[in-house]
Image: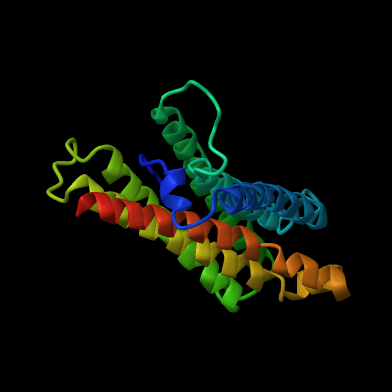
Amino acid sequence: MRSDIEYSPVAVGEGLKVRDFWLYAWMRKAAVIAAHVIGVSLTIIISVLSRPGTSRFSWHPLCMALAYCLCLTQGILIFSPDLSLRCRKPPKYKVRLHWLCQILVLLVATTGLGFIVASKNLSESPHLATWHSRLGVCTLAASALQAACGVCVLFPKLLRLSVPPPRLRLYHDTCSLLVYLLATVTVMAAMFSDWYQAIIKGLAWWAIFLMPVFPALVVMNQITKSYLLHKKVST
């Protein structure tokens, strides 16, 4: 998700008292920080539980956690106006970091798909037999579509597109929201698998199960506000 438009504190705090606005601003920054921390923590938890190297399957949850819990989350939150990068780099610097994260998402997720296909072939298990696997394929397909929209946003003249750039950004933002929601649901669906429920039970299961929800809410809020700003500018 790419945003060239910064949020205005005056617009965000319009109608609020000054003292209330500062509390509101700090709460938003705390929410973004928490989303970063939860994304990293969930990746670490899944990586430890999967014990990579013990089997072919063990690499699948590791790759998918790295792709969607870590790279996708960080790649979108790079553009967060509440916790932006404090540096003198031009805006293109964030775009490059975003694209690096998105490339890693596709590469690592495709690798994870390869491991689960090889594991199922080895055990002669059926493919696409669960909602988790079906949602995972949809998530990977939506990720490829999102990347294609991003290419169109970056190189509209080279591709000779007739669609105006603001509308291309809206399409890209919409795909980003779709991908993240699909990824969140897919991760949560994975926790109903026999493998996961054999490892984690009780309150720990519920705690980890609910962890992806908060980053999804933060990302959804960021993307929808970016959509509204782009819509306002384009009109």
Q: Can I make out residue 105 in this image? A: yes
Query: Looking at this view, is 130 or 127 the one in front?
Result: 130
Query: Looking at this view, is 107 or 155 the one in front?
Result: 155
| x and y, in percent, of residue 57 in the image | 71, 59
Q: Quadrant of residue 202?
A: bottom right
Q: Is residue 159 left or right of residue 39?
A: left
65 in relation to 4, above or below: below
Q: Quadrant of residue 212?
A: bottom right
| x and y, in percent, of residue 163 in the image | 16, 51
- Looking at the image, which residue is at 72% across and 74% down? 193
Q: Is residue 20 left or right of residue 155?
A: right
| x and y, in percent, of residue 166 in the image | 24, 48
- Looking at the image, which residue is at 71% across and 63% down? 211
The C terminus - image quarter? bottom left
Q: What colour scheme has been applied to the protein in the rendered image?
A: rainbow
- Looking at the image, which residue is at 22% across and 45% down? 165
Query: Looking at this view, is 147 or 63 the one in front?
Result: 147
Q: Quadrant of residue 173?
A: bottom left
